[in-house]
Amino acid sequence: MTGVLVDKACYTKDKANTTNAHKGMGDTCAADCAKKGQQVALVTPSGDVYDVKGEVAADMNAKLVPHMSHTMALTGEVTDVKGVKTITVPAAGLKMVSK
C-alpha cells in the first residue's frame, strides 16, 4: 500500500496538511510527534487513513520518524475494525517511494 506518512492527530485536525510543517509548529512537527510515540498514519492517494502498527512502529516509531511526510510503500496485514483501518507492518515492510 502506498501513501504519505503523517502524524494522525495533526492530520485529523487539518486534513489538507500532509507535510512535516503544521500550523505554527515549525518544520518538523510530524517527526517530533512521531518521536514522542504518537500514532503515525498512512494517507493513501484516495484519502484513506491507515494507522501504522507492527515492528516498524516499535521503539517510539524509530523506523518511521525519518520518513514522516514522505511517500512510502508499506507491506503488511490490513484490517478494518469498526471503521478504523490499520496496516500492521514487519520491519522489512517499509520502502520509500519519494520525499
Image (cartoon, rainbow, N blue to C red):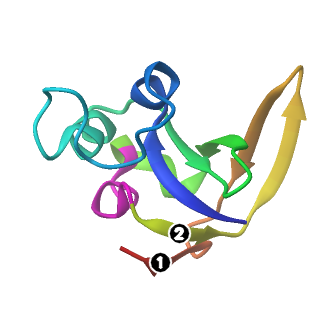
**Is residue 67 covered in magenta?**
yes
Q: Amino acid at mark 1?
A: Met
Q: Secondary structure at mark 2?
A: strand
Is 67 above or below relative to 93? above
Amino acid carrying label 2: it is Met
**Picture residue at 51% right of the left edge, 57% below the top:** 4
Which residues are drawn in magenta?
61-69
Residue at left offset 17%, top offset 45%:
28
The answer to whether 94 appears left or right of 21 in the picture is: right
Pick whichever, 85 or 14, lies toward us. Answer: 14
Residue 72 is labelled as 2
Q: Vertically, is 30 above or below 94?
A: above
Which of these two is toward me, 85 or 57? 85
Q: Residues within 10 Å of mark 1 (few under 14, many from 20)?
A: some
Residue 74, relative to residue 51: is it above or below?
below
Task: State yes or no: discs 2 and 1 in contact (Cβ < 8 Å).
Answer: yes
| Secondary structure of residue under mark 1 | strand
